[in-house]
Image: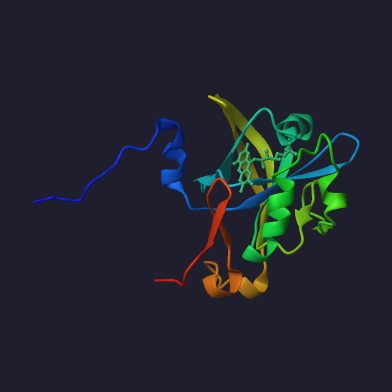
Amino acid sequence: MFSARYVDVPINRYTRLLHPKLVTLIVTKSGDGRVNVMPASWAMPTSVDPPLLTVAVSPRRYTYELLQARGEFTVNPVPVGMKSVVDFTGSVSGREVDKARSAGIGLFDAKELSVPCVEGALSCIECSVWAQYPAGDHVLVVGRVRVARVLEDVWDGTTYILDRAKPLLHLGGDKYSTSESEI
Ligand SMILES: Cc1cc2nc3c(=O)[nH]c(=O)nc-3n(C[C@H](O)[C@H](O)[C@H](O)COP(=O)(O)O)c2cc1C
């Protein structure tokens, strides 16, 4: 007999059932050259050939506006040590604050884009906008991956070395977790 009990989750909380998710920092740039950084946990691999990834971005975000302006972004998964950067960049909009400058976020040049990568992130995936699909209160922004780079020390050639990478996981809301070891 199957006896486990399931309880209803409010529909507007269904997203939490798909977490934890890696926290990434999405970097964009304005027409006048100002860099903006926003955390996103709704980013997912979408296609291998051509290499595509999708980020669900609310059109209310300054990041969305900058994606329309320049059509380029980088996706930077972060380690647990960067949680304070995630807290800050997720709590204010780049419309009000130059987040990269005021938080002293280190940036380095991307290989193919004018938009930079985040220092200390585990990896940097350079994308140009390939397609966009409105989806309810978010827009699915599909990026064509141009370049992908990873910190040498946390990569075994095919996957992250989890106990070195210590990726920051988002449980939902203001809750986070660390990943345990590989199984
Ligand atoms: C851990 C975390 C994950 C987030 N994931 C997303 C996401 O996937 N999509 C999104 O539109 N906003 C997401 N947000 C909210 C934005 O990061 C937040 O509203 C940010 O301040 C927007 O900055 P901007 O206006 O400078 O673009 C997330 C926030 C946090 C803290």
What colour scheme governs how the chains and residues are painted in the rendered image of this protein? rainbow
Residue at position x 79%, y 46% in the image: 115
Count of marks overlaid on the render: 0
For the point 84% across and 41% down, the residue is 97
Left or right: where 29 falls relative to 76: right
Where does residue 118 sit, x and y in percent of width and height? 75, 56
Q: Is residue 102 above or below residue 61?
A: below
Q: Nearer the viewer, residue 47 or 33?
A: 33
Determine the residue positioned at 59% across, 29% down. 139
Which residue is situated farthest in the left direction here? 1
Q: Which quadrant of the view contains residue 55?
A: top right
Tell whether 39 sits left or right of 170: right
Quadrant of the snapshot with the C terminus: bottom left
Say which residue appears at 81% left-offset and 56% top-offset.
105
Q: Position of residue 159 (x, y in %)?
A: 52, 66
| Residue 30 figure quarter | top right
User: Looking at the picture, does residue 34 appear above or below residue 171?
Assistant: above
> Would residue 49 be found to the left or right of residue 129 on screen?
left
Residue 153 falls in image quadrant: bottom right
Q: Nearer the viewer, residue 65 or 108?
A: 65
* Residue at the right extreme, as displayed: 32
Taking the image in four quarters, ligand 1 sits in the one at top right
Give the camera-side residue of 31 and 4.
4
Residue 49 location in percent, x, y? Answer: 52, 46
Where residue 94 appears, as percent x and y from the top left, is 80, 39
